[in-house]
Amino acid sequence: MSYTGAARKVGTNIDTDAIIPARFLVTTDPLELGKNCFEGLEPGWINRVHKGDILVAGPNFGCGSSREHAPIAILGAGIPVVLAHSFARIFYRNGFNMGLTLLEIGDAADTINEGDQLEVDPESGLICNLTQDTDIPCTPVPPFMQEILAQGGLVGYVRRQMAEAR
């Protein structure tokens, strides 16, 4: 699956409390969490986001506590994919487990500007910056991880595996 949308940039070392502050962890409803996405970074940030936008972050995105709510909030905000210089290890795992596509793009994250129109193909590992007419190669999402994403995350994937085993 490929994605096309406007880049929404955030900075370096964005922790899970900035993504979704603890005061909003009273639900696991993606839409409710999405309404408060990045409220700990910039109040009202969600008002600039449109469904299908692509999040672009600096190094160590998702650091801090192991909070499954963080990738759920990003998905609930309508953002299906995150491009980052690098991800905190536990966030990377939680993101895929919750069905959020994540791609590490190293220093190329710095070349993307707020609002640039991007086309992202996780299967091939190619990101096209349509605004700048440039391509950014990255490591493709492995087939096994693509299967997890196609099922909406790890729970959906396991449910499907169990159903097929019957």
Image (tube, rainbow, N blue to C red):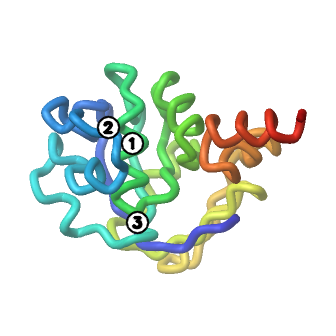
Could you tell me which secondary element the residue under label 1 belongs to? loop
Q: Nearer the viewer, mark 1 or mark 3?
A: 3
Residue that badge 1 annotates: 58
| 131 relative position to 136: left or right | left
Residue type at mark 2? Answer: Thr
**Which image quarter is the N terminus in?**
bottom right
Residue 67 placement: quadrant: top left
Instruction: Determine the CA span between mark 2 and mark 3.
Output: 16 Å
| 35 relative position to 157: left or right | left
Instruction: Determine the CA span between mark 1 and mark 2.
Output: 4 Å
Circle nearer the N terminus (2, 3): 3
Residue 36 is situated, as x and y percent measured from the top left of the image, at: 20, 50
The one of 159 and 96 positioned closer to us in this rendering: 159
Q: Residues within 10 Å of mark 2 (few under 14, many from 20)?
A: some
Residue 151 is situated, as x and y percent measured from the top left of the image, at: 68, 49
User: Does 86 sit above or below residue 127?
Assistant: above
Residue 23 is situated, as x and y percent measured from the top left of the image, at: 13, 33
Could you tell me which secondary element the residue under label 2 belongs to? loop
Q: Residue at x 62, y 59 (%)?
A: 136
The one of 35 and 38 positioned closer to us in this rendering: 35
Q: Residue at x 64, y 35 (%)?
A: 154
Residue type at mark 1? Answer: Gly
Q: Residues within 10 Å of mark 3 (few under 14, many from 20)?
A: many
Residue that badge 3 annotates: 7
Residue that badge 2 annotates: 12
